[in-house]
Amino acid sequence: MDRNSGRRWAALAAMALALAACQDMHKQRPVRSMIQAPASCTDINLSIYFEPNSAAITHEADRLVAAAREQARNCAVTGIVVLGLADAPGSLGANLELSKRRAGAVADELHKRGFTNAEFREGAAGAAGASTAAGADRPLRRRADVSIHLGPAYGVH
């Protein structure tokens, strides 16, 4: 074996050791993915409940809106629909006005929480549908139903 052959063998041995060391390091360190899964931008539906004869946002409602904002964080908000409802007892006019105030209060809260670039549609049902055909009152009508329509936000990381 001549002098150049010895150097080649030494170089090959050094490269083999270096590769083995890299493989050992690779096994020891966790591999982190550089690709993030896309956010799940599915529509959010929630109901915001109120105290009787009230349109004031409760602490629980505030937390629901904050959670919805967090869920929609990496998505494009394409539209928001808020429908205010009322219980059956009371006059039709008063219930309709109360459900309008509830829808407005929820829309205002959504706006405060960062839902600012979306088209809002507000509606009020009053007591319509609050009683069954047999005349029984439907429970838990003191609410506003919210649909937040989401889509993928391109360019958001």
Image: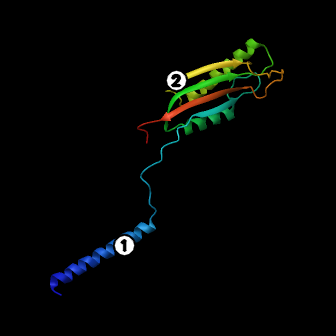
Q: Is residue 7 visible?
A: yes
Residue holding disc 1: 21
Q: Is residue 113 visible?
A: no
Q: Which circle's residue, 2 or 1, is located before the other in the chain?
A: 1
Residue occupying the point 43% across, 39% down: 156
Question: Which is nearer the eye, 21 or 16?
Answer: 16
Q: Amino acid at mark 1?
A: Ala
Mark 2 secondary-structure assignment: loop
Q: Amino acid at mark 2?
A: Glu
Quick one: label 2, few (<14), some, or many (20+) residues within 10 Å? Answer: few
Spot the residue most to the front.
133
Question: Which is nearer the eye, 57 or 122?
Answer: 122
Residue holding disc 2: 119
- The image position of residue 32, as x and y in percent, is 44, 57
Quick one: label 1, few (<14), some, or many (20+) residues within 10 Å? Answer: few
Mark 1 secondary-structure assignment: helix
Find residue 52 and name its label. none
- The image position of residue 43, as x and y in percent, is 57, 34
**Direction from residue 157 to residue 147 in the image, left or right:** right
Spot the residue most to the bottom.
1
Image position of 155 with respect to 16: above or below: above
**Direction from residue 93 to residue 156 in the image, left or right:** left
**Direction from residue 17 to residue 56 in the image, left or right:** right
Marks 2 and 1, how far apart in space?
Answer: 58 Å
- Quarter of the image for the N terminus: give it: bottom left
Image quadrant in which you'd find residue 58 = top right
Residue occupying the point 49% across, 39% down: 74
Residue occupying the point 48% across, 44% down: 38
Image quadrant in which you'd find residue 14 = bottom left
